[in-house]
Amino acid sequence: MPEITPIPLAQLTTLRTGGVPERMIDALSTDELVEALRDVWATGDEWFVLGGGSNLFVGDDPFEGTVVRILTRGIERLPSPRPGFARLRVAAGHDWDDLVAVSVSEGLAGLEAMSGIPGTVGAAPVQNIGAYGQETVQTLVEVELIDETTGEVETVPAADLGLGFRTSVLKHHYGSVPARRAVILSATFELADVGHGERRIAGAQLRGALGLTEDDTVSLAWVREHVLATRARKGMVLDDADPDTHSAGSFFQNAVVSASFARTLPDACPRWPVAPDLDPVVVIPLSAYEGLVPAPTSRESDVKVSAGWLIENAGLRKGFRFPRSRAGLSTKHALALTNRGNATATELAELARYIQSRVAAEFGLVLQPEPVLIGVEL
């Protein structure tokens, strides 16, 4: 469990903000990670784990606690009980995009649309990462985690993680605490063994992003290559030379709203239906049960709306920033707040609050931040 001289968090986060933590530990193996976390939890100090630093917005003041860097790596291929599938068990600190590259090289489908997403594998289930219609929940089988309450290591099925739109029971949402405080040690994915040949793409969202028709056939490698190119054009692939990539990705979540609220937005606002719960659980108190179960009440599906469109149509165009501020919207993608050169967290937070206020005034909707905020308020 090597304790190291603390490194400024501005050097370890893709948004490039954050002071020096009081203590920093590098965990190079799962055993070291478990030992480090148990040690930190026993002290009662403030703490957080750091993977790729791509989903964190950290304040300017020094962090008065311990940062545990998850540096574990490794991919293990396992058999699947389902014919035509294979499983990959991956260490939490392994680079996400490297996992995608390996899966494509082995002819395994299910992650290729998520090429180029920065961060580590352990962070993927926490916020159920996704892109172009693919999400972690579609292929995740289980995670191995260590629970803060008990200190015990256990294997948890994906179905018990509460995976939803960019969320899980493990995620620190802004203004609330996670339903379960735990750290992922490894994740296991089940992927279709489709080989390297060309095939039709089932997802309409991915086809649309890549300019494909229902009848077009392409290989996994082709999809990965073109997804990376598409993300690069939006400044969503990390590049030290490009300030548009000095961000936490999409800073605000695409909002999920009721169908009735969505109808109040302009028709031009992009929107996507959210799959309804087709088998809702009905709980009837025994004292009120009369031998009949009422028919389920149908309701309209919720709707996901484009936060990027709302920002631009609230008058905040790509590249917007305050005079003399070093924080600004990406020149390629209005949903990304970027550090244009030594911006402070204070400058970025000021911009984020202004965006929220403009969208709320124009459309009656308060956008919620997607990154985990540490030592900073909006």
Image (cartoon, rainbow, N blue to C red):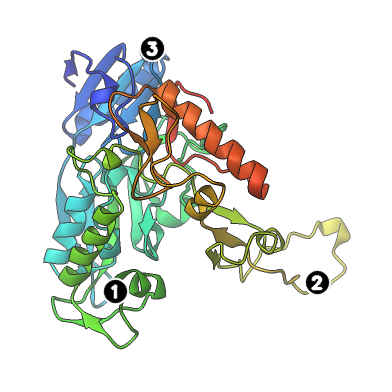
Q: Which residue is mark 3?
A: 64
Task: Give the residue drawn at x 48%, y 44%.
Answer: 252
Q: Depth check: 315 or 263 in front?
A: 315
Task: Give the residue drawn at x 34%, y 75%.
Answer: 207
Q: Residues within 10 Å of mark 3 (few under 14, many from 20)?
A: some
Coordinates of residue 97 in the picture (x, y in percent): 21, 52
Q: Which residue is mark 1?
A: 82
Mark 1–mark 3 CB contact (< 8 Å): no
Report whether 24 appears left or right of 305.
left
Relative vertical location of residue 252 with respect to residue 286 in this rendering, above or below: above
Quadrant including the N terminus: top left
Query: Counting residues from the N terminus, which is met first, the one under dot 3 or under dot 2?
Result: 3
Query: Which of label 1 and label 3 is nearer to you?
Result: 3
Amino acid beneath label 3: Glu
Query: Counting residues from the N terminus, which is met first, the one under dot 1 or under dot 3?
Result: 3
- Disc 3 secondary structure class: loop
Q: Depth check: 114 or 357 in front?
A: 357
When asked about the image quadrant of residue 43, the answer is top left
Tag on residue 294? 2
The CA distance from mark 3 to mark 2 is: 54 Å
Amino acid beneath label 2: Pro
Q: Residues within 10 Å of mark 1 (few under 14, many from 20)?
A: few
Whether residue 177 is visible to the viewer of this picture, yes or no, is: no
